[in-house]
Image (spheres, rainbow, N blue to C red):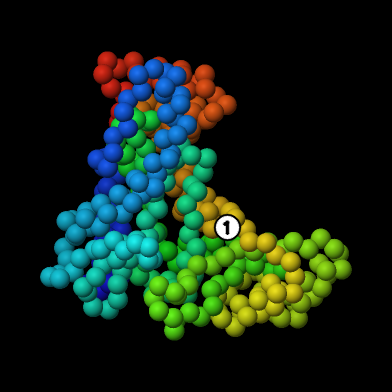
């Protein structure tokens, strides 16, 4: 097997963790509906802990469930990209970037900023693991569903969606390959045009035309980005804080996964219904839902 085969096998294996519960922590059952309302508003705060645990557990899971050659092993690496890599095989190191998603939050808030340049070998996947507490707002984290896709395809959707000079610049990092590993840069950034004077707007559009910058096709080459740098240096831009959010990439398979998760049943209701109920402005609905679930004698109804 070559590295791509191992990566494909890992992607298939990851889909089997759907329904798994991780004993990283156990949020206690609320004693009253008022306490349930309060807990529902803050449970997402544990996402970073859950995410780190998932990364460790995924590496362990792949090592236990894949047929690997002697000396080969999946390892978590932090803070380097991607989160887990397969070491000890010839031909390259397959890797998986893992994003934990708590679907009761407002949207899929994780970001994916890795440059296309680093993904051209096709040896990186992105995996999104949607999780909820096993009893909706308390209990141990449970994997609701799993999404796996080629990281390069996700990056291409991102860049094609945002790229629109002079109005929006997707800026690649400079060539930092000669730097030590900890100083190398690999994240792209998004910058939105800030000029509002008509003359300046026309100048920017003219420079875009003079530089032969393509507005309908993204180019990650250093030469193309030197041209984008002309626009960035001569006109006013601001860095876009929402750039590369997973929920906004317009990547069709990812959007389909979002819809699938939100419309899936968990504890007797769709997740989108739960999300609507626990928002701060709908406390009465949260109380009603918590009373419905707590109707079981000792535990709330678990996902089927």
Spot occupied by residue 227 in the image (x, y as percentages of width and height): 66, 79
Residue 96 seen in this snapshot = no
Residue at x-position 39% and y-position 76%:
181
Label 1 secondary element: loop
For label 1, the residue is 243
Displayed quadrant of residue 25 = top left
Residue 176 position (above or below residue 187)? below
At which x and y percent is residue 13? 25, 55
Q: Residue 126 falls in which quadrant of the image? A: bottom left
Could you say which is closer to the camera, residue 231 or residue 96?
Answer: 231
Where is the N terminus found, in terms of image quarters? bottom left
In the image, residue 88 above or below residue 134? below
Q: Nearer the viewer, residue 61 or 122?
A: 61
Q: How crowded is mark 1: few (under 14 residues within 10 Å), some or many (20 or more)?
A: many
Give me the residue at 57% from left, 58% from top.
Answer: 243
Q: Is residue 38 left or right of residue 138?
A: right
Q: State which quarter of the image contains the C terminus.
A: top left
Q: Is residue 28 left or right of residue 65?
A: right
Taking the spot 27% from the left edge, 78% from the top edge, the residue there is 91
Q: Position of residue 276 (x, y in %)?
A: 52, 30
> In the picture shown, does residue 180 fall above or below 166?
below
Q: Which residue lies furthest to the right in this view?
A: 199
**Which corner quadrant of the image does residue 240 belong to?**
bottom right
Query: Seen from this angle, which residue lies furthest left?
Result: 70
Total numbered labels = 1
Q: Is 27 in front, or is 115?
A: 27
Residue 294 visible at all? yes
> Residue 188: percent from the left, percent from the top?
54, 67
């Amino acid at each position: 097997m070559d590295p791509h085969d191992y990566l494909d096998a890992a992607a298939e294996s990851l889909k089997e963790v759907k329904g798994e519960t991780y004993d990283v922590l156990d949020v206690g059952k609320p004693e009253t509906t008022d306490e349930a309302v309060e807990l529902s508003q803050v449970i997402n705060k544990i996402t970073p802990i859950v995410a780190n645990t998932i990364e460790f557990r995924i590496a362990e899971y792949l090592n236990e469930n894949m047929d690997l050659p002697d000396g080969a092993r999946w390892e978590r690496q932090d803070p380097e990209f991607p989160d887990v890599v397969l070491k000890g095989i010839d031909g390259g190191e397959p890797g998986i970037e893992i994003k934990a998603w708590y679907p009761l939050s407002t949207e899929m808030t994780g970001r994916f900023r890795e440059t296309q340049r680093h993904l051209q070998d096709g040896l990186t996947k992105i995996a999104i693991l949607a999780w909820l507490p096993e009893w909706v707002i308390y209990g141990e984290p449970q994997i609701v569903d799993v999404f796996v896709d080629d990281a390069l395809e996700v990056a291409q959707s991102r860049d094609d969606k945002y790229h629109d000079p002079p109005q929006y610049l997707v800026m690649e990092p400079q060539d930092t390959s000669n730097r030590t590993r900890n100083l190398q840069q690999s994240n792209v950034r998004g910058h939105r045009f800030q000029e509002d004077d008509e003359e300046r707007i026309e100048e920017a559009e003219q420079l875009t035309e003079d530089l032969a910058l393509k507005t309908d096709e993204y180019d990650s080459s250093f030469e193309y980005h030197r041209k984008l740098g002309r626009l960035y240096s001569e006109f006013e831009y601001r860095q876009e804080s929402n750039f590369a959010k997973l929920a906004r990439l317009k990547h069709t398979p990812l959007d389909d996964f979002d819809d699938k998760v939100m419309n899936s049943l968990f504890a007797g209701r769709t997740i989108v219904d739960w999300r609507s109920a626990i928002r701060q402005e709908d406390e009465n609905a949260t109380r009603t839902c918590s009373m419905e679930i707590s109707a079981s004698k000792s535990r709330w109804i678990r996902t089927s």
